[in-house]
Amino acid sequence: MTSPVRHTRRAFTLLLGGALAGGVNACGLSGTGGRSITFRMGLRTALAPGEDTVGVFTTDTGWRVELTTARMVLGPLYLFEKASPLQPQALLRRLGEVLLPGAHAHEGDFFSGGRVLGEWDREVVFELLAGGGQAHVLGRSPGIAGVARSLSLLLQPPSRALGVEGDVMEGHSLVLAGTATRAEVRVPFRLALDFPPPVELQRVDFVPILADLDDEGFFVLELQPHRWFTGTRFERLPLPAGGTPVEVGPETQVHRALSVNVRRFDAFTGAWEPPEA
Protein backbone atom coordinates (compact mmCIF):
# COMPACT_ATOMS: atom_id res chain seq x y z
CA MET A 1 0.00 0.00 0.00
CA THR A 2 1.26 3.50 -0.84
CA SER A 3 2.02 5.50 2.29
CA PRO A 4 0.55 9.02 2.84
CA VAL A 5 4.09 10.47 2.81
CA ARG A 6 4.88 9.00 -0.60
CA HIS A 7 1.45 10.03 -1.90
CA THR A 8 1.82 13.68 -0.91
CA ARG A 9 5.39 13.85 -2.23
CA ARG A 10 4.40 12.25 -5.54
CA ALA A 11 1.38 14.52 -5.96
CA PHE A 12 3.45 17.62 -5.26
CA THR A 13 6.23 16.51 -7.61
CA LEU A 14 3.91 15.53 -10.47
CA LEU A 15 1.92 18.75 -10.23
CA LEU A 16 4.94 21.01 -10.18
CA GLY A 17 6.81 18.90 -12.70
CA GLY A 18 3.81 19.21 -14.99
CA ALA A 19 3.91 22.97 -14.54
CA LEU A 20 7.55 23.02 -15.66
CA ALA A 21 6.82 20.84 -18.66
CA GLY A 22 3.81 22.96 -19.54
CA GLY A 23 5.92 26.09 -19.30
CA VAL A 24 8.53 24.66 -21.63
CA ASN A 25 5.94 23.52 -24.17
CA ALA A 26 3.88 26.69 -24.06
CA CYS A 27 6.60 29.31 -23.71
CA GLY A 28 9.99 27.72 -24.34
CA LEU A 29 10.47 29.07 -27.88
CA SER A 30 7.52 31.42 -28.23
CA GLY A 31 9.22 34.72 -27.45
CA THR A 32 7.20 35.22 -24.26
CA GLY A 33 9.42 32.85 -22.28
CA GLY A 34 12.96 31.52 -22.28
CA ARG A 35 14.54 28.63 -24.09
CA SER A 36 15.03 25.20 -22.56
CA ILE A 37 18.25 24.95 -20.55
CA THR A 38 20.16 22.63 -18.23
CA PHE A 39 22.00 23.86 -15.16
CA ARG A 40 23.43 22.45 -11.94
CA MET A 41 21.67 22.41 -8.57
CA GLY A 42 23.41 22.27 -5.21
CA LEU A 43 23.19 22.78 -1.45
CA ARG A 44 25.31 24.83 0.93
CA THR A 45 25.18 25.80 4.61
CA ALA A 46 25.49 29.56 5.06
CA LEU A 47 27.84 31.12 7.56
CA ALA A 48 26.23 33.23 10.25
CA PRO A 49 27.10 36.95 10.07
CA GLY A 50 30.56 37.58 11.51
CA GLU A 51 31.42 33.87 11.74
CA ASP A 52 33.99 31.83 9.83
CA THR A 53 32.85 28.35 10.92
CA VAL A 54 29.74 26.58 9.68
CA GLY A 55 27.26 25.72 12.44
CA VAL A 56 28.59 28.25 14.98
CA PHE A 57 26.52 31.34 15.83
CA THR A 58 25.03 33.49 18.61
CA THR A 59 21.25 33.61 18.90
CA ASP A 60 19.17 36.72 19.47
CA THR A 61 18.59 35.45 23.02
CA GLY A 62 22.33 35.51 23.77
CA TRP A 63 23.15 31.81 23.50
CA ARG A 64 26.35 30.78 21.76
CA VAL A 65 25.50 27.64 19.77
CA GLU A 66 27.99 25.19 18.28
CA LEU A 67 26.42 22.39 16.26
CA THR A 68 28.20 19.05 16.18
CA THR A 69 25.54 17.17 14.19
CA ALA A 70 23.18 18.67 11.62
CA ARG A 71 21.47 16.72 8.86
CA MET A 72 18.12 16.98 7.14
CA VAL A 73 16.00 15.59 4.33
CA LEU A 74 15.39 18.12 1.53
CA GLY A 75 13.45 18.07 -1.72
CA PRO A 76 11.84 18.41 -4.09
CA LEU A 77 12.89 22.01 -4.88
CA TYR A 78 11.29 24.35 -7.42
CA LEU A 79 12.30 27.78 -8.76
CA PHE A 80 9.53 30.20 -9.79
CA GLU A 81 9.51 33.22 -12.04
CA LYS A 82 7.44 35.47 -9.76
CA ALA A 83 8.76 37.30 -6.72
CA SER A 84 7.78 36.20 -3.26
CA PRO A 85 4.53 37.93 -2.20
CA LEU A 86 6.33 38.70 1.06
CA GLN A 87 8.77 41.05 -0.69
CA PRO A 88 7.83 44.77 -0.74
CA GLN A 89 7.93 45.09 -4.54
CA ALA A 90 5.71 42.02 -4.91
CA LEU A 91 3.20 43.43 -2.44
CA LEU A 92 3.02 46.67 -4.44
CA ARG A 93 2.59 44.74 -7.67
CA ARG A 94 -0.22 42.64 -6.18
CA LEU A 95 -1.94 45.82 -5.03
CA GLY A 96 -1.69 47.15 -8.58
CA GLU A 97 -3.20 43.95 -9.94
CA VAL A 98 -6.17 44.38 -7.60
CA LEU A 99 -6.69 48.01 -8.60
CA LEU A 100 -6.03 47.41 -12.31
CA PRO A 101 -6.88 43.79 -13.01
CA GLY A 102 -5.74 42.32 -16.29
CA ALA A 103 -5.61 39.00 -18.09
CA HIS A 104 -2.05 37.96 -17.36
CA ALA A 105 -2.57 34.36 -16.31
CA HIS A 106 -0.39 31.95 -18.24
CA GLU A 107 -0.46 28.27 -18.95
CA GLY A 108 1.98 26.65 -16.54
CA ASP A 109 1.19 29.05 -13.66
CA PHE A 110 1.25 27.34 -10.24
CA PHE A 111 0.20 28.85 -6.93
CA SER A 112 1.31 32.51 -6.85
CA GLY A 113 4.79 31.72 -8.14
CA GLY A 114 4.03 31.75 -11.85
CA ARG A 115 5.91 29.41 -14.13
CA VAL A 116 8.33 26.86 -12.75
CA LEU A 117 11.72 27.73 -14.28
CA GLY A 118 13.78 24.99 -12.63
CA GLU A 119 13.43 21.94 -10.44
CA TRP A 120 15.17 19.26 -8.44
CA ASP A 121 12.47 16.60 -8.20
CA ARG A 122 14.13 14.25 -5.74
CA GLU A 123 14.96 14.20 -2.04
CA VAL A 124 18.39 14.08 -0.49
CA VAL A 125 19.94 13.74 2.96
CA PHE A 126 22.19 16.77 3.44
CA GLU A 127 24.96 16.93 6.04
CA LEU A 128 25.02 20.61 6.93
CA LEU A 129 28.45 20.59 8.58
CA ALA A 130 30.26 18.67 5.84
CA GLY A 131 32.38 20.42 3.26
CA GLY A 132 33.32 23.46 5.32
CA GLY A 133 30.67 25.63 3.72
CA GLN A 134 31.46 24.52 0.19
CA ALA A 135 28.53 23.74 -2.08
CA HIS A 136 27.42 20.14 -2.50
CA VAL A 137 26.45 19.47 -6.12
CA LEU A 138 23.22 17.51 -6.47
CA GLY A 139 23.28 17.14 -10.23
CA ARG A 140 21.91 18.68 -13.39
CA SER A 141 18.42 20.15 -13.63
CA PRO A 142 16.16 20.94 -16.59
CA GLY A 143 14.74 24.43 -16.76
CA ILE A 144 13.72 27.49 -18.71
CA ALA A 145 16.02 30.48 -19.25
CA GLY A 146 14.82 33.50 -17.31
CA VAL A 147 14.91 35.25 -13.96
CA ALA A 148 13.71 33.15 -11.01
CA ARG A 149 12.58 35.29 -8.07
CA SER A 150 11.25 32.78 -5.53
CA LEU A 151 11.49 29.13 -4.62
CA SER A 152 9.53 26.43 -2.85
CA LEU A 153 10.78 23.22 -1.24
CA LEU A 154 9.53 20.31 0.80
CA LEU A 155 10.72 19.11 4.21
CA GLN A 156 9.58 15.54 4.83
CA PRO A 157 10.55 12.32 6.58
CA PRO A 158 12.89 10.13 4.51
CA SER A 159 11.07 7.92 2.03
CA ARG A 160 11.96 4.47 0.74
CA ALA A 161 13.35 6.11 -2.38
CA LEU A 162 16.41 7.18 -0.37
CA GLY A 163 17.30 3.58 0.43
CA VAL A 164 20.16 3.12 2.89
CA GLU A 165 21.03 6.80 2.56
CA GLY A 166 17.96 7.60 4.63
CA ASP A 167 18.80 5.20 7.46
CA VAL A 168 20.98 7.78 9.21
CA MET A 169 17.88 9.92 9.78
CA GLU A 170 16.11 7.19 11.80
CA GLY A 171 12.81 8.31 10.31
CA HIS A 172 13.24 12.00 11.17
CA SER A 173 13.19 15.03 8.90
CA LEU A 174 15.89 16.99 10.75
CA VAL A 175 18.44 15.98 13.37
CA LEU A 176 20.52 18.51 15.31
CA ALA A 177 22.97 18.17 18.19
CA GLY A 178 25.43 20.53 19.80
CA THR A 179 26.07 22.79 22.75
CA ALA A 180 24.51 26.10 23.74
CA THR A 181 26.49 28.32 26.13
CA ARG A 182 25.60 31.57 27.89
CA ALA A 183 27.72 33.02 30.69
CA GLU A 184 28.55 30.03 32.93
CA VAL A 185 25.69 27.87 31.73
CA ARG A 186 26.44 25.10 29.25
CA VAL A 187 23.60 23.08 27.68
CA PRO A 188 24.48 20.07 25.53
CA PHE A 189 21.42 19.13 23.48
CA ARG A 190 20.02 16.82 20.86
CA LEU A 191 16.73 17.15 18.98
CA ALA A 192 14.85 15.71 16.05
CA LEU A 193 12.08 17.36 14.05
CA ASP A 194 9.43 15.55 12.03
CA PHE A 195 7.33 17.05 9.24
CA PRO A 196 4.57 14.52 8.49
CA PRO A 197 1.68 15.15 6.05
CA PRO A 198 -0.32 17.10 5.05
CA VAL A 199 1.93 18.61 2.40
CA GLU A 200 0.77 22.14 3.28
CA LEU A 201 2.67 21.81 6.57
CA GLN A 202 5.78 20.43 4.87
CA ARG A 203 6.18 23.03 2.17
CA VAL A 204 8.43 26.09 2.59
CA ASP A 205 7.06 28.73 0.24
CA PHE A 206 7.89 32.27 -0.88
CA VAL A 207 11.67 32.08 -0.36
CA PRO A 208 13.05 35.22 -2.11
CA ILE A 209 15.82 34.63 -4.64
CA LEU A 210 17.21 36.38 -7.71
CA ALA A 211 18.69 33.95 -10.22
CA ASP A 212 19.12 34.67 -13.94
CA LEU A 213 18.95 31.05 -15.05
CA ASP A 214 20.96 30.03 -18.07
CA ASP A 215 22.77 27.01 -19.49
CA GLU A 216 25.62 25.55 -17.43
CA GLY A 217 25.16 27.85 -14.44
CA PHE A 218 24.89 26.72 -10.83
CA PHE A 219 21.98 27.38 -8.46
CA VAL A 220 22.74 26.78 -4.77
CA LEU A 221 20.07 26.47 -2.08
CA GLU A 222 21.62 27.96 1.05
CA LEU A 223 20.47 26.71 4.46
CA GLN A 224 20.51 29.32 7.26
CA PRO A 225 20.71 27.37 10.56
CA HIS A 226 21.52 30.48 12.59
CA ARG A 227 18.04 31.76 11.72
CA TRP A 228 16.40 28.52 12.82
CA PHE A 229 17.36 29.23 16.44
CA THR A 230 15.73 32.67 16.63
CA GLY A 231 13.92 33.09 19.94
CA THR A 232 15.18 29.82 21.44
CA ARG A 233 15.47 29.82 25.23
CA PHE A 234 17.79 27.08 26.35
CA GLU A 235 17.47 28.22 29.97
CA ARG A 236 14.03 26.61 29.99
CA LEU A 237 15.40 23.14 29.28
CA PRO A 238 15.73 20.72 32.22
CA LEU A 239 19.40 19.74 32.48
CA PRO A 240 20.19 16.06 33.13
CA ALA A 241 22.87 15.18 35.63
CA GLY A 242 26.42 14.40 34.59
CA GLY A 243 26.52 16.61 31.50
CA THR A 244 24.43 14.21 29.41
CA PRO A 245 22.86 15.94 26.39
CA VAL A 246 19.27 16.93 27.01
CA GLU A 247 16.76 15.41 24.60
CA VAL A 248 14.79 18.41 23.34
CA GLY A 249 11.23 17.11 23.04
CA PRO A 250 8.12 18.56 21.35
CA GLU A 251 6.85 19.90 24.69
CA THR A 252 9.80 22.33 25.01
CA GLN A 253 10.02 25.96 23.90
CA VAL A 254 13.24 25.27 21.96
CA HIS A 255 11.62 22.50 19.93
CA ARG A 256 8.54 24.59 19.18
CA ALA A 257 10.63 27.57 18.08
CA LEU A 258 12.72 25.44 15.73
CA SER A 259 9.67 23.70 14.30
CA VAL A 260 8.25 27.08 13.30
CA ASN A 261 11.49 28.75 12.22
CA VAL A 262 12.70 25.97 9.92
CA ARG A 263 9.54 26.37 7.84
CA ARG A 264 9.78 30.16 7.58
CA PHE A 265 10.54 31.79 4.23
CA ASP A 266 13.83 33.21 5.58
CA ALA A 267 15.15 29.84 6.80
CA PHE A 268 16.65 29.34 3.35
CA THR A 269 17.93 31.48 0.53
CA GLY A 270 19.48 30.90 -2.87
CA ALA A 271 22.51 31.97 -4.86
CA TRP A 272 23.18 31.82 -8.59
CA GLU A 273 26.65 31.36 -10.02
CA PRO A 274 26.75 32.03 -13.77
CA PRO A 275 28.77 29.76 -16.06
CA GLU A 276 32.43 30.60 -16.37
CA ALA A 277 33.28 32.60 -19.44
Image (cartoon, grey):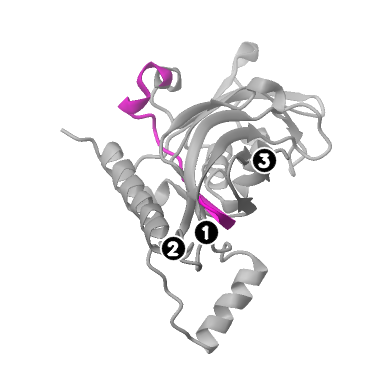
Q: Residue furthest top?
A: 242
Q: Is residue 276 left or right of residue 221?
A: right
Mark 1 in CB contact with mark 2 (< 8 angstroms): yes
Q: Residue furthest bottom?
A: 100
Mark 3 in CB contact with mark 1 (< 8 angstroms): no
**Label annotation for residue 153:** none
For the residue marked with disc 3, what is the amino acid? Answer: Pro
Residue to which mark 2 is pinned: 27
Which portion, as a residue range, is magenta? 144-165
Viewer can see residue 231? no
Q: Nearer the viewer, residue 214 or 160?
A: 214
**Label annotation for residue 34:** 1
Q: Secondary structure at mark 1?
A: loop
Residue to which mark 3 is pinned: 275
Residue displayed at 37% across by 53% down = 21
Query: Is residue 158 part of the magenta span, yes or no?
Result: yes
Residue displayed at 36% across by 58% down = 22
Viewer can see residue 172? yes
Residue 251 spot, x, y in % from top left = 48, 37
Residue 80 spot, x, y in % from top left = 51, 56
